[in-house]
Amino acid sequence: MVTKKKAWKIRKCRRSLHWLAPMAVLLTVAGCATQQPTPVPFPLPLPLASTSQCNEQQQEIVRLQQMLADREHQIKHLIADQKNKDLEISKLKTHQQNQTKELKETTNQASRAEVKLRRFATEADVASRLVEVEMAMKTLESRLDTRHELPLQVLAHGLLDKASTAFKRGKYSVAADHAAQAEQLIEMMTEQQPTTESATPFKVAIPLKTKLNGQLRRKPDRNAAVIDKLQTATPVVARSYKAQWLQVQTENGNSGWIFSDFVEPR
């Protein structure tokens, strides 16, 4: 049986429970009402450039634009100068070509006049000319290596022999022609012309023939392209020279270069 004292304690506990339940509810509601909401993050604004920085950037843009304009002006000026220089070079080339043409014409006229004079050469004139050419040959040979004759030296000797033979037969104009041709070969050896210079025309064309099978080349070079193959005893006419090379023309009209060792007087 429950005593009065125990019953009283039970009623007291129940009263405490009735009071605590509403308090717990009130505290829960109050806590929910006072809870702060979670803030939504917003992007931070970019820092704005200061006025001084904007001014500096604007000044730099203006400076670069001015520099670009100056460069364009310089380029236009250089292009104009180049055009003027090209025009001057073109004028100089034209003038040089005209001078070369005039020089060739003058040389041709002098050669024709010399040929005419030789046609009317007297015995005394031709004899004097032969002596002069022979003396020039001896002077040249005194400076050359006598152990080895140059191809041009052999040609010159052959022409001098032909000149002497023609003189003895009374063919003075033929003797004068051969003497003039030999003299040109002697001048070639005396000048010792470098291979880098341009070809030098003969005052008088030299009739020759090949003494060996040879090749007519486009340039005075052993590695140059071959224009034609010449058989032994092919007639050619030498019109200019460069070092030990002769520029010749064949009877069929081919013109090219042949080494002087492959030809001899006709």
Image (cartoon, rainbow, N blue to C red):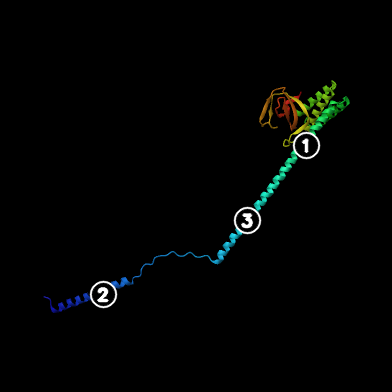
Q: Which of marks 2 and 3 is nearer the N terminus?
A: 2
On-image quarter of the N terminus: bottom left
Numbered tag placed on residue 69 in the rendering:
3
Q: Is residue 211 above or below residue 143?
A: above
Residue at figure coordinates x 57%, y 64% from the top left: 55
Q: Position of residue 175 (x, y in %)?
A: 83, 24
Q: How crowded is mark 3: few (under 14 residues within 10 Å), some or many (20 or more)?
A: few
SS at circle 2: helix
On-image quarter of the C terminus: top right
Q: Residues within 10 Å of mark 1 (few under 14, many from 20)?
A: few
Q: In which image quadrant can residue 251 be found?
A: top right
For the image, the number of numbered tags is 3
Q: In this view, does 109 lie above or below 68?
A: above
SS at circle 3: helix
Numbered tag placed on residue 102 in the rendering:
1
Residues at marks 3 and 1, CA–CA distance in whole angstroms: 50 Å
Q: Name the residue under label 2.
A: 23
Residue 27 visible:
yes
Q: Where is residue 213 in the image (x, y as percent from the top left)?
A: 69, 24
Query: Marks 2 and 3: which is nearer the front?
Result: 3
The reply, left or right, for residue 10 in relation to residue 102 is left
Q: In which image quadrant can residue 17 be found?
A: bottom left
Residues at marks 2 and 1, CA–CA distance in whole angstroms: 133 Å
Residues at marks 2 and 3, CA–CA distance in whole angstroms: 86 Å
Residue at figure coordinates x 16%, y 78% from the top left: 8
Q: In which image quadrant can residue 241 be found?
A: top right
Nearer-the-camera pick, 149 or 209: 209
Q: Residues within 10 Å of mark 2 (few under 14, many from 20)?
A: few
The reply, left or right, for residue 41 in relation to residue 7 is right
Q: What residue type is labelled 2?
A: Met
Q: Position of residue 258 (x, y in %)?
A: 71, 29
